[in-house]
Image (spheres, rainbow, N blue to C red):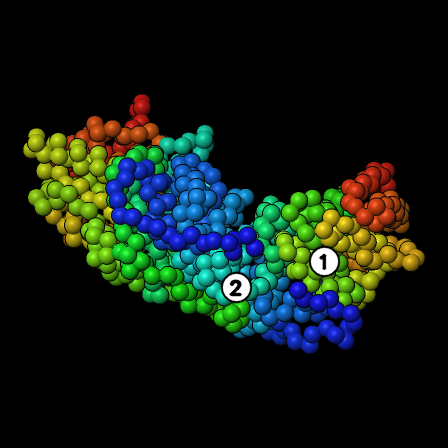
């Protein structure tokens, strides 16, 4: 077991995700990668389905930011890569071909890799009972690597290069954001599922440690603000993580051994327009459409509070955006 | 962890059995003491996995069998288990292989010695479960070695040899063993297994050069690299390994004879070629029928020989050129097709013709296309021999492609 960390001062100084990368200024996924590597420590294998965190992390001059073993896997291969790696450790240890010890197998994939093309593979991964197998979905809400295309976790109303706002189609992305973590929680063998964002850092680090210690396959979906995809100033990355929590645009929770709890409950609700308006991807929305997003968040929050009260998962439901308001320009 | 309990030791007794091709391959996987197996069902290869699952359940040997959610996952699982240092086994057929194509491509570029068995099957539609080679031929250009078995015994032998060749430091490439669907996968024939001592001496445990395991330090594998920096060099590495493999294959079959006692000519099986004027060239199970037809027609004065390629990648071009330098005409028995290719032939024909382009006196060539999964009969092979004989007598080929099993007009 690895101990939970009580204060930022106790966070290990050593990084296993370090220099030798060329991520964007203010990159959210890079911050969470670093926190994750600190949480996991040296006896770890990282696997990377194709994403920003593949392309930006080792490039051009044969550099590598990884101080632990790392291997790429295909965009839809995250689940299989985790299982294959874990299966090898299990077999080699069982057959005395390798020293028997705990080795963390962590797959760090994007929303494209886990919510779309690798969704089935992730589901398979959640059925494999290797005891230190963690899947982390770094959710920056688009295919950022290929130039910001919509994925199934892109929020309603956001523009992407596949869902631009135009004279005829105003809204941009009209699909509602898929809740991947809830679908993962529906897998019976899973011991630990959580959502997080890169703030507060200890929250994510400790969730990663709980996940790795859960003695089964585990999953964390971490919201990672992306300056390029969301169109904001790179200095504001952490600020947007905070705002996402305070506006309840992102709900932070965990589901450990069948018990649900909210891990961040804002004392007072900040209006979602404070989160949406500074982001370029929502700049085309008129006030009534922003109000409609607020209405959906408020509707859904009732379910999350109820879950927190009952300590169990209830499927949240909210009515789709009002068509008349969607049609407004 | 429950798998820590009792790990059975692999027990191998040299014995004779009557086994299907799939059962024989399962035995080879057991003998090779494979660590990780990734399974997903599709006919006709599935029987291998059924048998392996039963063997592991009964404690005949220890292996981690992963029940995958798709062929893509299957091949990714094998790839990643191999990267850690496990000996791996995987396989598929037909459209299943097509589904796994992406993972199959990167396994070769990652230079991981995964061994896969393909039970050759037509690419659908409409759910065609007949035998064609086009599934395996999808991977012609990827850097996988491909050997082609003629029967259940050879499928077992080739699987063991595949591990040895693939894992050799001079090669380190993945390896397909192809066996024709139904004709080998589902037909029971006598099979002899090696002794444990012989098999262990022939096939030592796999030692990867750079395991993806923290115990061996930090390895970054397949990071994203600008093509201008190492693109061509990386392709050249695979090319170089493939070129090296010919020597390793020769050595491996010599060693196999030494330790296991069964002898094969490594690249070609030539039958009746000593005095042959014409030849049939093929791979796989139906070569036996072709030999039967050739023997029959020899009694009627047609001097026909049969050449069977045992490897398709690396393609034994030199061996084929030597074997065919005196042939006036030859027919290719072709279970592949390449729609719209030069002269509308099969892909196998294209390779054979390409290899023979270097021969001084080029033989006349006819492609006998046997696609769509309808099983050919001996009379089809007799017809092929007669057509080649006719071409040799006339000194020219009037029709380059014949669809032998087609009903109706061959337009």
**Residue mark closest to the camera, 2 vs 1:** 2
Q: Nearer the viewer, residue A44 or B318?
A: A44
Residue at image coords 54%, 57%: A86
Chain identity of mark 2? A
Q: Is residue A54 visible?
A: no
Residue at image coords 58%, 66%: A44
Image vertical order of residue A118 relative to residue B336, above or below: below
Give the x, y percent position of residue A270: 90, 57
Q: Nearer the viewer, residue B181 or B243?
A: B181
Image vertical order of residue A153 relative to residue A280, above or below: above
Q: Is residue B202 visible?
A: yes
Q: Which residue is mark 2?
A: A100
Give the x, y percent position of residue B10: 37, 52
Give the image quarter of residue A327: top right
Quadrant (top left/top right/bottom left/bottom right) for the N terminus of chain A: bottom right
Residue extending furthest toward the right: A268
Q: Which residue is mark 1?
A: A222
């Amino acid at each position: 077991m690895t101990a939970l960390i009580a204060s930022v001062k106790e966070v290990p100084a050593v990084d296993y995700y370090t220099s030798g990368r060329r991520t964007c200024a203010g990159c959210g996924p890079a911050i969470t990668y670093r926190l994750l590597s600190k949480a996991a420590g040296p006896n770890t294998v990282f696997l990377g389905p194709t994403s920003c965190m593949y392309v930006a992390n080792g490039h051009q001059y044969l550099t590598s930011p990884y101080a632990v073993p790392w291997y790429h896997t295909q965009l839809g291969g995250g689940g299989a890569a985790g299982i294959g790696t874990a299966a090898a450790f299990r077999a080699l240890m069982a057959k005395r071909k390798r020293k028997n010890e705990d080795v963390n197998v962590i797959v760090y994939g994007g929303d494209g890799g886990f919510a779309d093309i690798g969704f089935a593979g992730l589901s398979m991964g959640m059925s494999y009972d290797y005891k230190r197998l963690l899947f982390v979905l770094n959710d920056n809400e688009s295919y950022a690597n290929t130039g910001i295309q919509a994925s199934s976790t892109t929020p309603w109303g956001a523009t992407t290069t596949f869902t631009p706002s135009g004279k005829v189609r105003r809204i941009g992305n009209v699909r509602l954001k898929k809740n991947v973590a809830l679908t993962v929680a529906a897998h019976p063998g899973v011991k630990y599922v959580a959502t997080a964002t890169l703030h507060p850092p200890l929250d994510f680090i400790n969730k990663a440690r709980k996940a790795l210690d859960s003695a089964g396959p585990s999953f964390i979906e971490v919201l990672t603000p992306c300056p390029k995809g969301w169109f904001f100033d790179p200095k504001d990355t952490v600020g947007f993580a905070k705002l996402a929590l305070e506006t309840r645009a992102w709900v932070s929770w965990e589901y450990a051994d069948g018990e649900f709890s909210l891990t961040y409950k804002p004392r007072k609700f900040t209006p979602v327009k404070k989160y949406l308006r500074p982001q370029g991807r929502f700049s085309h929305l008129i006030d009534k459409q922003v109000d409609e997003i607020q209405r959906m968040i408020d509707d859904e929050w009732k379910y999350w509070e109820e879950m927190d009260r009952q300590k169990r998962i209830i499927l949240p439901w909210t009515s789709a955006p009002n068509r008349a308001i969607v049609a407004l320009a | 962890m429950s798998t820590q309990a009792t790990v059975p030791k692999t027990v191998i007794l040299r014995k004779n059995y009557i086994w299907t091709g799939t059962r024989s391959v399962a035995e080879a996987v057991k003998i090779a003491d494979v660590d990780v197996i990734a399974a997903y069902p599709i006919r006709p290869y599935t029987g291998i996995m059924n048998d392996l699952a039963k063997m592991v359940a009964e404690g005949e040997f220890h292996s981690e069998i992963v029940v995958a959610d798709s062929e893509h996952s299957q091949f990714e699982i094998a790839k990643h288990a191999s990267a850690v240092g496990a000996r791996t086994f995987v396989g598929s057929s037909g459209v299943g292989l097509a589904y796994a194509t992406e993972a199959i491509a990167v396994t070769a570029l990652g230079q991981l010695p995964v061994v896969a068995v393909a039970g050759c099957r037509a690419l659908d539609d409409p759910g065609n479960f007949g035998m064609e080679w086009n599934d395996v031929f999808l991977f012609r250009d990827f850097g996988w070695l491909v050997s082609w078995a003629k029967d259940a015994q050879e499928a077992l032998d080739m699987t063991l040899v595949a591990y040895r060749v693939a894992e050799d430091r001079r090669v380190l490439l993945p390896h397909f063993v192809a066996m024709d669907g139904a004709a080998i996968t589902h037909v029971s024939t006598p099979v002899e297994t090696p002794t444990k001592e012989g098999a262990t001496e022939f096939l030592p445990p796999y030692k990867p050069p750079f395991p993806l395991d923290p115990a061996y330090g930090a390895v970054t594998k397949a990071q994203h690299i600008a093509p201008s920096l190492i693109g061509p060099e990386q392709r050249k590495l695979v090319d170089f390994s493939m070129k090296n493999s010919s020597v390793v294959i020769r050595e491996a079959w010599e060693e196999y004879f030494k330790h296991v006692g069964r002898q094969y000519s490594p690249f070609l099986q030539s039958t009746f070629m000593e005095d042959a004027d014409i030849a049939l060239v093929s791979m796989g199970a139906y070569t036996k029928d072709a030999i039967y037809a050739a023997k029959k027609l020899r009694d009627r004065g047609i001097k026909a020989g049969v050449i069977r390629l045992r490897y398709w990648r690396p393609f034994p071009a030199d061996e084929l050129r030597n074997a065919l330098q005196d042939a006036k005409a030859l027919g290719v028995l072709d279970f592949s097709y390449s729609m719209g290719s030069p002269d509308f032939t099969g892909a196998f024909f294209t390779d054979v013709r390409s290899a023979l382009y270097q021969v001084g006196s080029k033989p006349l060539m006819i492609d006998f296309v046997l696609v769509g999964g309808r099983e050919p009969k001996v009379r089809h092979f007799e017809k092929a021999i007669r057509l080649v004989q006719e071409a040799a007598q006339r000194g020219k080929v009037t029709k380059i492609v014949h669809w032998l099993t087609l009903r109706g007009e061959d337009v």
